[in-house]
Amino acid sequence: MPAERLVLVSADCHAGPRPEQARAYVEPRWRDAFDAWLGDEAGRARRKAEHTGLAIYGDEALEDFGGLDAVRDGGMDGAWNSARRQAELEADGIAAEVIFPGGSEATVAPFDAGLMTYQYSQDPAVWRAGCEAYNRWLADFCHQVPGRRAGVALITLDDIDTTVHDIGALRDRGLFGGVLLPGGTGDHPLYHHPRYEPLWAACAELDLPVHTHSGWTPNYGDFPASLGIFLTEISWFAHRPLWLLLWSGVFERHPNLRLVMTEQGATWIPAMLAQLDQLYEMPMFGHLRRQLPLRPSEYFDRQCFVGASFLGPDECASRYAIGVDKLMWGSDYPHLEGTWPHTQTKLNEAFTGVPEAEVRQIIGDTAIDVYGFDRAKLEATATHIGPPSNAVVTATG
Amino acid sequence: MPAERLVLVSADCHAGPRPEQARAYVEPRWRDAFDAWLGDEAGRARRKAEHTGLAIYGDEALEDFGGLDAVRDGGMDGAWNSARRQAELEADGIAAEVIFPGGSEATVAPFDAGLMTYQYSQDPAVWRAGCEAYNRWLADFCHQVPGRRAGVALITLDDIDTTVHDIGALRDRGLFGGVLLPGGTGDHPLYHHPRYEPLWAACAELDLPVHTHSGWTPNYGDFPASLGIFLTEISWFAHRPLWLLLWSGVFERHPNLRLVMTEQGATWIPAMLAQLDQLYEMPMFGHLRRQLPLRPSEYFDRQCFVGASFLGPDECASRYAIGVDKLMWGSDYPHLEGTWPHTQTKLNEAFTGVPEAEVRQIIGDTAIDVYGFDRAKLEATATHIGPPSNAVVTATG
């Protein structure tokens, strides 16, 4: 009898439109502006340089990754090519995926809206036009493989009523992955501010999880050091909304709201929760304790999840401290630093010695629950393409 | 034979002038502005509230600390009263101290210059007038007990030539504690920017350590959550200059420059150095490795020190991972959360089971070296007031 196959869901994949695809999804009244934006290669390169000091996926970095030939040969074209993507994901054993922006060098973030929204100052209407173009493209991209692509939509923060309106439209477009909180809030206050209250209410009511995903940092300027600073600080800026929402009582007021923290590590969580619980117990926090009946770690248990891209043995060893049902595995496809195309090997490295029930939880069950995938459908799919349980779950590596 | 007494140096104490003292040290041309600033109690309260949501040393917090009676009775007056301070420090066993701003509710930071410099926008000349008034007061305060008070001076960042000029004057004033890097840089770039190069050169040449001390964060606004966010983020903002200086090659170009990180914990350091070393080894960091021949942890070993206020058993347990000769004990006098007036008990709690040579290094020797205290003089003082070695260094608590 062949080994049973596991339902594998990647809680962190990336995709984006090619320039000509993006253009088709930009509202006609913004097409001229889009063409000007796209044509301004020097400006886009300058903004990228001001952020990290150099392009991470520049030639030198790709050479160092050993991936330049692969990219030149179209090795990351699954970022925008639906059929190729689906074949590669299935060959990797993945039954369903959660899609974030940030595809490949061949794709674009319309008007820079994506992981870098609010990276610099721009007319709010332009940011929104970029988000809307991406969301429309994403909806169609997800519909290519119904029920197996949970697209995470982009939002703006300039006018929260508008944002709530845009969020209301996501279900109509068939997008069920939730929304990405911009990593930076531009000239607006951080996420503890009451102005965001309608945003949390809308996401809770529509059962759309809100996400943070590493990528955004302040601009450090075009200096050699900037890449080092960027990579040192990038995870902290992604973590930050956790305590902004927590201390401001967002989780208390909206018990159905879920926060998913993706591609920002996981081993930091136990120490951070211990710190937050310790602060909560401090005498001077009487005024906060009266507003927050639960301890920080209890709100985390109730409402937070971790998209642990290319989850490794270290994170796996922390699974009880974090919560086995809090962790979701992710492949980071099609990024070169992720597990693709060696996912089965990487899974085995991460999960050697872990009980099968826990593995199933982490690589599939939690994501099915968080995103509302159709379990029966994914189980049927996994029968054909899922990784064999005896290859992933072994007593020794 | 009585037990030998240890040389105890506090690497973290606080002091400040009372309003009328401060006024006397403000340059005459700034006196009217100072009076207006001092008289604007509503403005000062508002700025404080915009920072943390409430005054940490407000009545409620003090009640919770159990210290309100003590403060009402002048229990923190050692913040500005030199004779009282010296008596209390000596009763606590402390032979010498490093003085940071931020005394007590009875003292002021002239024009808000102190731990909160650049907390908000203000005429650069006013920031400088505040720093200069504080530095002049501090010099006189330190001279009250020659050789036993290392005052850490305030600087501004608006015009680096001016800052370098002001730093040059510190030795003439007898201030040998070094300088405090403003926790925020206002509208100026972060510390990796080349504009600060003359600052590092001046501090290296004059053998004045640069310090970070927790206190500064962005303003979160006057919300209940703000205190929680403030205390969650405060240490990170204090840590930040470590990697800004590191990645930008400041330690490489100025091997004599020393960075002291005070009152921001210490247990975070091994994991942070491991992360920085790991980034350094990444393939894409070729351009940084060519500029930085040492690994991040090697620069730390060479040039960084930790002012571990009220160092506890946890930090002590990390001493080999951090470096026994990197850690300096501090009492945080006269702050209520510090070890005063129970220093001997707290020392014993922290150092139970630690070899005496290591204890001596952490509670005195390193600070003597970093700040250039006169060792013979402090040894003579300790003969009278130092804590007995057999009370601090015990095999079991």
Image: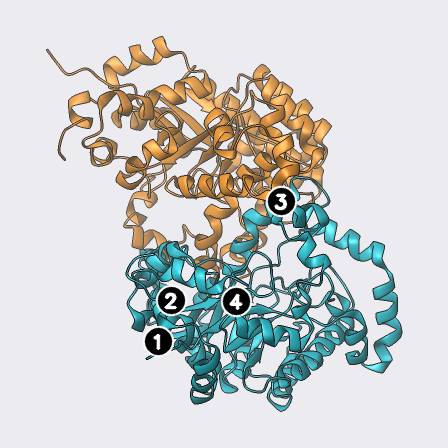
Chain colours: A cyan, B orange
The residues tagged by marks 3 and 2 sit, at their Cα atoms, a distance apart of 33 Å
> In the rendered image, which residue does mark 4 sit on?
A192
Kindly tell me whether residue A150 is visible in this rendering: yes
According to the picture, the residue beneath numbered tag 3 turns out to be B284
Residue placed at 38% from the left, 33% from the top? B322
Closer to us: A345 or A304: A345
Quarter residue B63 falls in? bottom left
Asked if the residues shown at circle 3 and circle 2 are in contact, with their CB atoms under 8 angstroms apart, the answer is no
Q: Which mark is first along the chain, 2 or 1? A: 1
Q: Amino acid at mark 4?
A: His
How far, Cα to Cα, is label 1 from label 3?
40 Å
Instruction: Check chain identity for marks 1 and 2: say if they share one.
Output: yes
The tag on residue A374 is: none
Do the numbered discs 1 and 2 sit on residues whose CB atoms are within 8 Å?
Answer: yes
A299 or A91: nearer the viewer: A91
Q: Residues within 10 Å of mark 1 (few under 14, many from 20)?
A: few
Q: Position of residue A119 (x, y in %)?
A: 69, 59
Quarter of image, res A25: bottom right
User: What secondary structure is marked by label 2?
Assistant: helix
> Which residue is labeled 1 in the image?
A3
Q: CA distance from mark 2 to mark 4?
A: 45 Å
Check disc 2: other Cα within 10 Å, few if <14, some if 14-19, many if 20+. Answer: some
Query: Residue A391, labelled with which disc?
Result: 2
Q: What residue lies at 29% left-to-right and 43% top-to-bottom? A: B70
Q: Where in the figure is residue B347, as x and y percent of width and height? A: 24, 32
**Disc 4/disc 3 C-alpha distance (Å):** 36 Å
Q: Chain of mark 4?
A: A
Residue A195 visible (yes or no): no
Q: Nearer the viewer, residue B258 or B296?
A: B296
Q: Chain under label 2? A: A
Give the mark nearer the N terminus: 2 vs 4: 4
Does mark 2 fall on the same chain as mark 3?
Answer: no
